[in-house]
Amino acid sequence: MDESLANTVRAEARAWLEANWNPELGLVEWRNKLADSGWGVPHWPKQWYGRDLPVALVPVVEEEFARLGAVGVAKAGIRTLAAATILAHGTDFHKEKYLRRILTGEDTWCQLFSEPGSGSDLAGAVTRADFKGNKWVINGQKVWTTSAHRAQWGLLLARANWDVAKHKGLAYFILDMKQPGVQVHPLRQMNGHASFNQVFFTDAIVEPEFLMAEVGDGWKVATTTLMHERRGADGLRSWATATNLKGRIYDEERAEVATTMEPYKWYPQRAGRVDLVLERARATGKINDPVVRQEIAKLLIMSKAAEWTARRARAAQEQGRPQGPEGSLGKLVASHVARAAARIHTHISGADALLSGEDGPMNGVIPEILVSVPAVSIAGGTDEIQRNIIAERVLRMPKEPSVDTDKPFRDVPRNIVST
Amino acid sequence: MRFSFTSEQEEFRTMLRRLLDARSPATEVRRLMATDSGWERAGWQKLNRELGLTAIHVPEAYGGQGFGFSELGIVLEEMGRSLLCAPFFSTAALATNAILNAGTDDQKKALLPPIAAGDITATLAFSEDDGRNDAAGVTMVATPSGSGHRLTGVKSFVLDGHTADLIVVLARSPGSSGESGLSFYTVAGNAQGLQRRRLKTMDETRKLARLQFDGVEAQLLGEAGAAAAPFARTMQQAAILLANELVGCAEKLRESSLDYAKMRMQFGRSIASFQATKHKAADMLVDVELAKSAAYYAAAALDDGDDDLPAIASLAKACAAEAGLQTAIHAVQLHGGIGFTWDNDTHLWFKRAKSSEVLLGDANYHRELMMQRWAN
């Protein structure tokens, strides 16, 4: 990194923040100032609320924000994916209309990709987009949509052409969620929470100017969104921590974080709560059961080795070395750890594992682990897909012969639910 | 550094791998494993002197190079990969550490330079016929005799015990029990009254011997009656070093079966294109990488003087033992029928993974040791 540029940027950011930061401002009012000055997203283009700075300098600016306790632009949720996708593929009209309100947090977004008939095989989407009377008419169903009930806008992947191959017939739209043709229903999970939604389209309308790129480019645009989703997945919790500082703007930020994080409150249980295992085993006396001891030891070994593997990957990254295979394993290993932890929590709890809620161990935390862990090996790419990715990208094993990519999608066998 | 190697360490590994690939191809492993000694003095001395392998972690004051366990771990990982047939683990990972942990300064000055120089080989005799790895299990008795001691009893499962020039022996004073009254002694390999018999081993690349002592003359090493602590330390170091050797062995098995799967055609396509094969290959990568992380971390923890070392050592050994075995099983499976033949090399590494799984205590044993540190 260029040291003198870093120093200049730091000084400029500090001067601007010292002159403008005021915790008694409203959240939106302050973020509009950030958008006007370019300091909220300094790596974005100057023309669009940024300062054209290299991404490597963003941490320098963030340090200056942290020094004063200054609040940043809205970063939580799907809106960051929307921003990245619009910056990469959107028209000036899209950028003008959406980017500022994304930064201020006034608009909430949702991602309309997964369908009941296409989970791992996302490009097999069958939600229809038909061009009728100068408008796109949308029919079909999406699922696993976080925040759909609150969102103003959706990033929609739909099929516009059934006579070409699967990946070539997709189109990518920005859809107005607040219209009569869009119905949102919460989707209740096996652990009782409803963190996601199902979204139904019945002749929902998209005006032509809300198509991103061209018809047929939908998969390419979706790949941009997915790439940013994967890159940001680790940051999920870092942005979720609200401060306890005093001031109007902090109160508004806390409310925003609480709303955004509400769907994720069971996520620690989903990961298995390895941190509770020894404590629970001591409390129940199961720590003295030699079989349970062995199982606990296996879990702790796997969990420690997983942690150290992640540290190896990070160390390689920080030293600018090419990342070895250790960087691609985290998601799959996390599934193994969570499953083993859930099994052991069951063994430790004995008959108490039959109970839930306030009757269950630790006021229901343990039962919530048992019924939340199955999500880990499915959400964000199933274990099976992770293994395929490791095998094909890391181990360079050949792809399976394809049966659906070189014929019109109309002729590809698919799930009955999608007709 | 517990999470990465320095560029010097990486260069050392590269050079070592190149040399071991050249000197210890599978044909050479097969030739040496069929001999009674299991290794050849001339070839081993040449390689050892070129690289100073037995000197690596010996302090300079005792004729060594003064590197740490991270470097020694690299050597063992590469030896596990190449299945080098040499008395290295017995000499460097067992006897040298016992002398470093227990010996007086004068004893280290006398015993270590010829070991570091590669002039003599050595081993550590602790297990007896019941195969226990703990100090409390020792029954061999040392009785005072003149200026020295005389050893009577049996040691078994002694690594390279039939060829070692110097044997470090763990024995106890008459009438003592448990962890008290234990001392280390040194015995010459050709001492009178010592009968050495090579045991027939499942893993022919790793020779074990049963040693019968009938009043064998021995010299006390370190403080009398105080060997329990340095012995425990030696076992922790050995467990970590064996974990590093195991990950080298496992990585070799993983790579060779992946290469084979990519080449093997069935049903008109490479078997590597089947998901059943891919998923197994991905699982093997996970097992090996996790075990590497634990083995590297533990070796660095030794160099850093980590307080939690006993637990970390057992963690690394248990993790590597399971990973090595699982990888070996998958490797034979991926090779199919040819993987079960003697002519195919897979069984050489399979057997090494299996013998390393058991040597110094299996995964159940080490998980229990770890829990004894962490459970309360």
Image: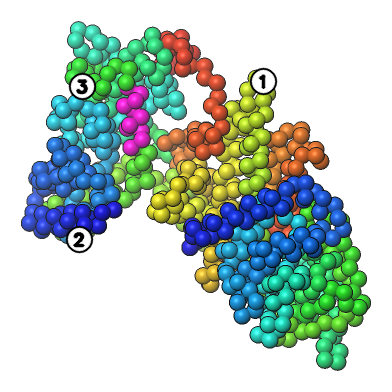
Dot 1, crowdedness within 10 Å: few (<14), some or many (≥20)?
few
Alpha carbon distance from label 2 to label 3: 40 Å
Residue assigned mark 1:
B267
Q: Which mark is residue A210?
A: 3
Disc with the residue nearer the chain's start (2 vs 3):
2
Residue nearer the viewer, B310 or A284: B310
- The answer to whether residue A193 is above or below residue B88 is above
Dot 2, crowdedness within 10 Å: few (<14), some or many (≥20)?
few
- Dot 3: what SS? helix
Residue assigned mark 2:
A67
Q: Do the residues under discs 2 and 3 have CB atoms within 8 angstroms?
A: no
Q: Is residue A88 left or right of residue B229?
A: left
- Residue A265: horizontal and vertical position, in percent? 35, 46
Q: Is residue B349 visible?
A: yes
- Dot 1: what SS? loop
Q: Give the amino acid at mark 2.
A: Arg
Which region shows up in magenta?
A218-228
Q: Is residue B130 left or right of residue B116?
A: right
